[in-house]
Image (spheres, helix red, strand yellow):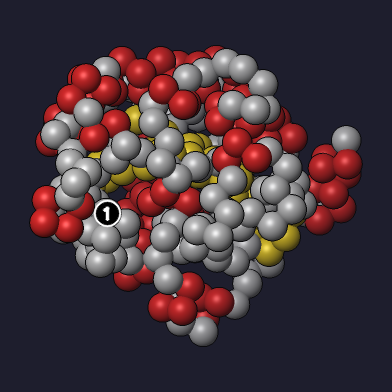
Amino acid sequence: MIAALTLALTITAAPDVYLLTGQSNMSGRGLVEALTAAERTADPAIQVYGNDEQVRPALDPLDDATGQVDAVSSDAGLAAVGPGLFFARATQTLRPKPILLVPCAKGGSSMAQWTPGGGRDTLYGSCLARARAVGGKPKGILWYQGETDAGQADSAQAWRAAFETLVARFRADLGAKLLPIVIVQLADPPSPAISAPKTYPGWAAIQAVQAGPLPTCVAMVSAQGLPKKPDDLHLTTAAQRDLGPRLAQAMDKLRRAGCR
């Protein structure tokens, strides 16, 4: 009730709501210091429903853990620049409406951790609760995940079925049979020389699944070739700046095709 009241007082025009889901590259690990002055200036038409259940003008890090209510998705001290705000800015050039972003991503999370069901102590349950708190009718979902599952061949093989189940459940629980969802195909695999002793035997398998075929009203944009930080796993701020508009174009195409 408090969150709903805060939302009502903060946003006078009904915004287009988008859920930001997945793992660390959606939460964001790009450097805030690499943002331009303009990118550090809030646009009152783009807001975020923060992890503290307060609505405010959106600035990176969107997934800031200050005042976090649902500890299950906390990326305390890690969340920085992801694709969400770049997506929102690009979307506004295509659809000039207020936007509300709802961060739900969790660094290192696997598909198993996103299993639908459960309460607010689960990633899915927490995200669903937040979506409902802001009206329960998101215009779309962004999904960037797979790096953790690429670490094991068996979880990589199970990725497709788990993702299709997740899509179906989000749509059922949010009452939108054709809710548009845009996923990011994994970037280039980490170099063994950098990632060792951890390896990613399922990376290519997940990339192949993410390339399609995908469920109806689900689109993919690729992160391959985008620059990464020295850990060779997380995208740089420059990469996220490039990725955001790609996501916006793909989402807009789905919505124009009747996905809703």
Where in the figure is residue 55, as x and y percent of width and height?
74, 54
Q: Which residue position is annotated with label 1?
A: 233
Quadrant position of residue 151: top left
Label 1: element kind: loop
Q: Nearer the viewer, residue 254 or 22?
A: 22
Q: Is the N terminus in the top left, top right, bottom left or bottom right quadrant?
A: top right
Q: Residue furthest front?
A: 197
**Relative vertical location of residue 225 with respect to residue 34 in this rendering, above or below:** above
Seen in the image, is 112 located left or right of residue 42? left
Where in the figure is residue 215, as x and y percent of width and height?
32, 21
Q: Residue furthest bottom?
A: 37
Identify the residue at image location x=32%, y=66%.
236
Could one spot residue 224 in this view of the protein?
no
Q: Nearer the viewer, residue 102 or 252?
A: 102
Identify the residue at image location x=82%, y=42%.
3
**Relative vertical location of residue 115 with respect to residue 198 in this rendering, above or below:** above
- Number of disc labels: 1
Q: Nearer the viewer, residue 57 or 115?
A: 115
Seen in the image, is 189 located left or right of residue 30? left
Mark 1 burial class by Cα count in 10 Å: few <14, some 14-19, many 20+ = many
Residue type beneath disc 1: Leu
Could one spot residue 192 in this view of the protein?
yes
Quadrant position of residue 204: top left
Identify the residue at image location x=55%, y=30%.
123
Quadrant position of residue 112: top left
**Relative vertical location of residue 176 with respect to residue 110 in this rendering, above or below:** above
Where in the figure is residue 43, as x and y percent of width and height?
63, 69
